[in-house]
Image (tube, helix red, strand yellow):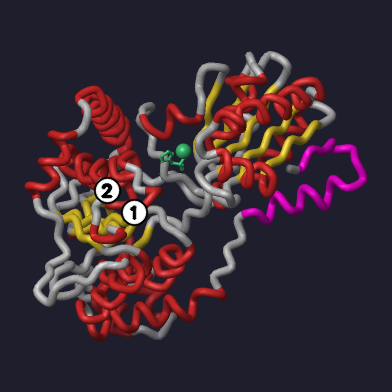
Amino acid sequence: MIFTNSTSNSFELEFEELLSRGKMDIANVSGIVGNIIKEIKKDKNKALFEHIAKFDKWEPKEDEDLKISAESMLHAYNNIDGELRDALHLSYDRIKTYHEKQKPKSWFDDEPNGTILGQRVTPVDSAGLYIPGGKAAYPSSLLMNVIPAQVAGVENIVVCTPTPDNEPNELLLAACHLCGVSEVYKVGGASAIAAMAYGTENIPKVDVITGPGNIFVATAKKMVFGDVNIDMIAGPSEIGILADESANPNHLAVDLLSQAEHDEMASSILITPSQNLANTVKIKIEDWLKKLPRQEIARKSIEMRGAIIVTRDMDEAIDLMNQIAPEHLEIATNNAFELLASIKHAGAIFLGHYTPEAIGDYMAGPNHTLPTGGTAKFYSPLGVENFMKKTSIISFSKKAINEIGEECALIANTEGLTAHEQSVRVRLEK
Ligand code: HSO
Ligand code: ZN
């Protein structure tokens, strides 16, 4: 762990390390992923089945359609604990309500001379959602991807998830039933991304692919981008915390660990002007680590990618945090809303002493698929807009084209595009 002070000699180098945390070394895997995509494009199921046998360790039969049956999803739903079912429904409803507010609206502008200009927003026809399998098969991630697509009005929603040893994750199946998703395919990794981008005998080609995944999935998404749209390239989870003496160090310690336990490569960073708080949080992290079932992962993450930085004052802390542009930012101070205006970059901001990042992972309502690795400087959270596109609307009356047609024709003429010029001019009154 980097435990440092912004005035120390080594600080610049240490901070550089934090800024470069998101760099993914895709050069190493782009050859393999490129081949996988080529094979799926050419041989479809044949290649897909070989990849499943190799990576997921089960052999699909020749007529295998890879689709999980509606009955098994219903069965899984009925079999989960009732309280958990209710909790998932509450989560579903809250996420849906939030995303409905987000839905962009079409608009039309009507000018008195008969010009109508506007923008129509419509859903894409189909979306492919990638949900990791195995240990990181989170039903919450399914909800966070499905709901914005449903709210956007996407008609065909396809889910791909790996099923190691041909054993689907029951919780994920239950969540699929709860969300009303019926097309779920047992395929993961770069193969799944290629299958959804180009289509196979069973898996339909989609327009947009979203969802988290490892470096192979991320690289595949980069490679198919352009043939389909994608959401963002998400890396390991991150949490940044800005705090002062009013914060509870015990709470902050477990908040930092809540992201560290995701992944050895996750980053958890506390920046505070209080040396006292920094010291206590460090001790509390150690106490918590002993109690966590996932302490091995969390410890590695904290050791390799954790940081506690003590600054001269809160202004400096905010400046450093803006450079980091964390996926999640907690502001644990009494004046959190006052500080909000100074925060330029973060995927999601959690304000005050009673807003742990984890409430946003499951229940608050906003999406938990967020830009990582500093990409909050230019990416937004996953949302309804990822599943919609805009079309410009233009209509001119005779009066309207006569008002500006001459100027339009003039520009066309200067560009040497005579048909452009004439297609306007023939409509003008002599
Ligand atoms: N914090 C993760 C999402 C997640 N947490 C899923 C729990 N389950 C990335 O934002
Ligand atoms: Zn999380």
Residue at x 19% of width, y 74% of height = 200
Residue at x 27% of width, y 48% of height = 169
Kindly indicate whether the residue at mark 2 contacts the one at mark 1 (C-beta within 8 angstroms).
yes
The three-letter amino acid code for the residue at tag 2 is Asn
Give residue 2's quadrant in the image: top right
Above/below status of 272 relative to 168: above
As drawn, the label of residue 133 is 1
Q: Is residue 394 magenta?
A: no
Q: Give the residue furthest to the right.
A: 9
As drawn, the label of residue 67 is none
Task: Using residue 318 as the reference point, say whether residue 148 is left or right of it.
Answer: left
Task: Look at the numbered disc 1 and say if its residue's Cβ is closer than 8 Å to ligand 1.
Answer: no
Indicate the quadrant of ligand 1 in the picture.
top left
Q: Which residues are magenta?
A: 2-21
Q: What residue sits right under mark 2 in the picture?
A: 169
* Local secondary structure at mark 2: loop
